[in-house]
Image (tube, rainbow, N blue to C red):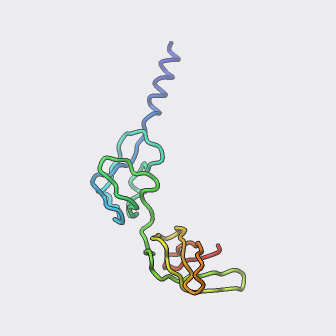
Amino acid sequence: MIRLVALLSLVAASGHCDVLIANRAIPSRSIIAAEDVSVAAQSVQGTYTTPEEVIGREARVTLYPGRPIRRGDVGAPAVVERNQVVPLRYATGGLFIETEGRALARAGVGDLIRVMNITSRTTVTGRVAPDGTIEVGK
């Protein structure tokens, strides 16, 4: 009987963990500040647990008050906007090619993004560099 009580208390204690929730409605494309979020005791998988994980990042979707903030809801602040003309860079060994492309989505530093090469009209995928250049083939 004692073992059963101990097991039930252990299961009950592990059922709840801290999750991060929005304190107010945060529109998409907004940068999240410290006063915008707080920690609540809930049991939701795939969510952030500490404010440090989201402060200074950009809301990718509208975040509603009292709802947990999920992993896909925030990302790096966008440095490339949809339809923006961006430099495409491919470098390997001694070969270095640079041309212009048109971004097909918004993206932040480190994100993968699809870009249409303006010259050849082909679509390639590359990673966004801090200066807004798209690095292809790495």
Q: Which residue is found at the position 45% from the left and 80% from the top?
A: 84
Q: Which residue is found at the position 58% from the left and 87% from the top?
A: 119
Residue 43 found in image quarter: top left
- The percent coordinates of residue 37 (x first, y second) are 33, 53
Q: In the image shown, does 98 or 102 lie closer to the viewer?
A: 102
Q: Which residue is found at the position 48% from the left and 23% from the top?
A: 8
Where is 111 relative to 130, above or below? Answer: above
- The percent coordinates of residue 74 (x first, y second) are 42, 59
User: In screen coordinates, is 70 left or right of 89?
Assistant: left
Q: In the image shown, does 116 or 90 lie closer to the viewer?
A: 116
Q: Quadrant of the C terminus?
A: bottom right
Q: In the image shown, does 14 or 101 lie closer to the viewer?
A: 101
Q: Which residue is found at the position 44% from the left and 62% from the top?
A: 75
User: In screen coordinates, is 131 left or right of 27?
Assistant: right
User: In screen coordinates, is 80 left or right of 90?
Assistant: left
Instruction: In the displayed orientation, state which residue is furthest to the right.
Output: 93
